[in-house]
Each structure stands twice: as structure tokens, then as C-alpha cells.
Image: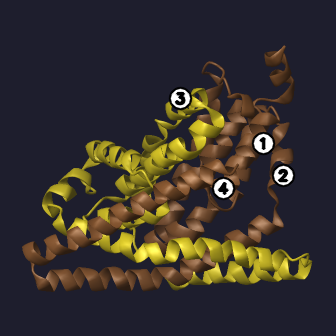
Chain colours: A brown, B yellow
Amino acid sequence: MSRPPTIKRQLFDTSFYVFLVLAVGGGIAVYFLKGEEIFFGTLQKDLTLFLRIVPQIVGGMLVGGFISVLIPNDVVARWLGRESGFRGIFIATIAGTVTPGGPIVSFPIILALAVAGADIGALLAYLTAWVTLGLNRIIVWEIPFMGFDFALLRFVASIPLPFIAGYLVRRLPPVIFPEAARPPDEKRDGDA
Amino acid sequence: MIVSMSIIWGLVLVLGLVTYQRGRGGFGDALMFARKQALIVVPRMPIALIAAGFLAELMPQELMSVWIGSESGFVGILIAAGIGALVPSGPIISFPVAIALMHLGAGVPQLVTFLTSWSAFALHRTLMWEAPLMGWSFVSRLVAVVSPLPFVAAGIAALVGTVIDISAGL
């Protein structure tokens, strides 16, 4: 599990420098093309926005921290692994919605579900719910940036999505997982 | 603004009390978790916001509002889905981009499409997590089943929008 975070770190740093270059380059371009007034106006607007968003982001991260302590990952995986049918997709959707934190938290759960032989529909529903309905992201990012009304609208509009993804994937040819994500009995079959 | 602030800090208070009551060092662990995240995110956020703000200022605003504005309809939704799928980064960059699109006059269904498309496709997540952990066979199924999702969300958002008037922003 140590590999993905390091890769993540490198990519994140690259994108961070890209944005630094964009900020400086964009700033210079605005200053010379649009004038001093618009340059300082934009800068002030964005910094004010930052100051308004920070307390909410920090609060959201605390919420994520508390939830990850209160609901350990293996509990979620155990709870989900055996269900299939509509029930499987439904429970997976709720689990994905409440899973806190970023991919460092959710992908170990997804991997554990695959290894436990969870139904692919439930797996996809979990992943789709985590990315589109995830309360953690809504609390930390969406409400501070986009406002409560918009976040609520997008949440409501996204409720069917995990179900669509879960039912669609069951109609596709089965997934061939890499060795590390296969249930142990299949692994033995492969070795024999 | 005050509503969302009260919701978040109310949750912090309740969950913090529950965690503290339970003991077992969970409270300290939770604080460390939040601190680690905040140290990565908070210093980087103003740069992302400023970059998105300047770039929005440089965009041809009339053209952008024709492309993705509230009057842009399905073409605007297609464009928003395309932009969302191409943002190869986490929320630290996609939300400033969403704000910039909002200032450029993007319509609410188009903003819903942008965020759904970004979160469903997330190029960076595919490369860093899904492909190495779950394999390309899984990734191909994932891409196939999430493709219609931004349009479904846009459709529902547009329908809701005909009944209740919702605007983005703080």
C-alpha cells in the first residue's frame, strides 16, 4: 500500500507547480492586458474567498478525522462483502456516501471488497457513491466553495448514479482482476 | 455561509464529543488525521484560487457564457462534461475551476455536469489508484458505466431547476 501515496505525492507536487506557474503567468498577463485595477481586484476577491473558505475546510477535515476513528475501514468491508442484488448495491451506496477521507481510505476498502469476492455491482456502486455522493467531500469542499443550496441540488441529482453504475456493470463481461485483488481461492486455482 | 459554517462546526462539536467520550486515543488520532490533511491543503489553496481567478479574467467572457451559460443547453452540458473529464487533479484544483466557471456565467446544470464528470472520471485517480490496484479490466468497465452519469445528473438538476430556483455561490 505504500506505492500509491508516493506516486500521488509526486503527481500532486507537479500539478501544484503547474498551478503556481499559471498563477504567476496569469497574474502578469492580467496586469498588462487588463490593467492594475483588475489585477488587484481579482487578487483581493480570491484572497477574501480563501479566508472565507478556510475555517469550513478545516472543520470538514476534523469531521473526516472523527468519522474515520469512529468507523474503522475493516468494519465497512466486512459489512459489505457478502451482499449482492439490489440490497448489495443499496448498502454499498450508503457505505460509499459515508466513507470519509480521500483515496487513501477508500481504495483499501475497495481492494478488500474485491478480495472478499464482493459482487462487482456493489463494488462499482460503492466507488460511484463515494465520488458523487461522498459526504466528506461535500462537507470539506463543496459547501464551502459552492454553497449549501447548490451542494444539496447536486447531491439529489446524484442519488440514482450509484444504482445506474451498479446495474450497468453487471451487464458487462466480468472483470479480470490483477492477482493482488483476487479472492484467495481463485489465486490458488491460478497457481495450480 | 452562516448555515454551512454552523452545520460543519456543529458536526465537529458532536463527533468530537463522541470520540472524546469513547477514549482509546481516538481523539488524538483524529486531530492528527485532520492536521496532516490541512497542512497539505491549506497552503496550496490560495495559489489554486488565484490561478483560477486570473485565468477566468483572461477568458473571453461573452464566448464562455454562450458555451456553458444557463442558455447553452445540451451543448453546454457536453462542453462542461468534457472540461470535467479533463481536470487531472483533486478537489484542491477542481473546485477553484468550478468557481471560475461560475464567475464566467456557467449555468447550474452545467456546473453539476462539470463536477459529476470530474469526480466520475478523475484521470489522476485512475492513474494513481484504480489502474495499479484494480487493473485495466476494472478501469475499462468503470469508464463505460460512469460515462452516462454526468448527463443523468445534469438532467435531474435541470428538472429540479424548473421547479425551484437554485443558484450556486456562497
Residue A50 higher or lower than A175, as above or below: below
**Quarter that holds the C terminus of chain A:** top right
Where residue A51 sits: x, y (%)?
44, 85
Report in which chain the residue with disc 4 lies.
A
Does residue B16 appear in the picture of this structure?
yes
* Mark 1 lies on residue: A112
Where residue A45 sits: x, y (%)?
30, 82
What's the amino acid at mark 4? Answer: Ile
Do the residues marked 2 and 3 share a common chain? no
Does residue B4 appear in the picture of this structure?
no
Structural crowding at the residue carrying mark 4, measured as other residues with C-alpha within 10 Å and reported as few (<14), some (14–19) or many (≥20): few
Q: Disc 4 and disc 1: Cα gap in Å? A: 13 Å
Residue A78 higher or lower than B23, as above or below: above
Q: Are marks 2 and 1 in contact (CB under 8 Å)?
A: yes
Q: Residue at x 86, y 46 (%)?
A: A78
As drawn, the residue found furthest toward the top would be A192
Structural crowding at the residue carrying mark 1, measured as other residues with C-alpha within 10 Å and reported as few (<14), some (14–19) or many (≥20): many
* Mark 2 lies on residue: A74
